[in-house]
Amino acid sequence: MSLPTALSWVLILAGLWSLIVWPPFLRRVLKDPRARDESGKPTKFLTVHIMLVSISMILGIATLVIGIRSLFG
């Protein structure tokens, strides 16, 4: 894959950003009182946020890999 070096770095930084930002967000969501109901079962709030974080991190990994491959290969 051939991209200009500057664009490769943008992809790498975007991928790293996703991998750095989303885990702390998920930790805050897990501690949120809306994450579980009175019996301790996960709520839709928790389910939606877990899906959001999972998809965002998968896309972040893909973006990072594409950036690295375009920079070095």
Image (spheres, grey):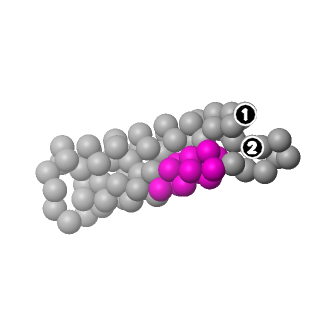
- Which residue does the image show at 24% across and 59% down from the upper left? 70
Q: Which residue is mark 1?
A: 33
Most prominent secondary structure in the magenta stretch?
helix
Outermost residue to the front: 38
Judge from the rendering whether residue 16 lies leftward or rightward of residue 42; answer left or right: left
- Which residue does the image show at 41% across and 51% down from the upper left? 60
Mark 1 Cα-neighbour bin, 10 Å: few <14, some 14–19, many ≥20? few
Q: Which residue is mark 2?
A: 36
User: What segment carries the magenta color?
Assistant: 44-55
- Which residue does the image show at 26% across and 43% down from the upper left? 10
Residue 41 can be seen in this image: yes
Depth check, front residue: 66 or 41? 41
In x, y percent, where is residue 23?
A: 57, 42
Judge from the rendering whether residue 60 lies leftward or rightward of residue 44; answer left or right: left
Judge from the rendering whether residue 60 lies leftward or rightward of residue 37; answer left or right: left
Q: Provide the secondary structure element on which disc 2 rests.
A: loop
Residue 68 can be seen in this image: no
Magenta stretch: residue 52 in it? yes
- Which residue does the image show at 34% across and 43% down from the upper left? 14
Disc 1 and disc 2 in contact, CB within 8 angstroms: yes
Quadrant where the N terminus sits is: bottom left
Three-letter code, disc 2 = Arg
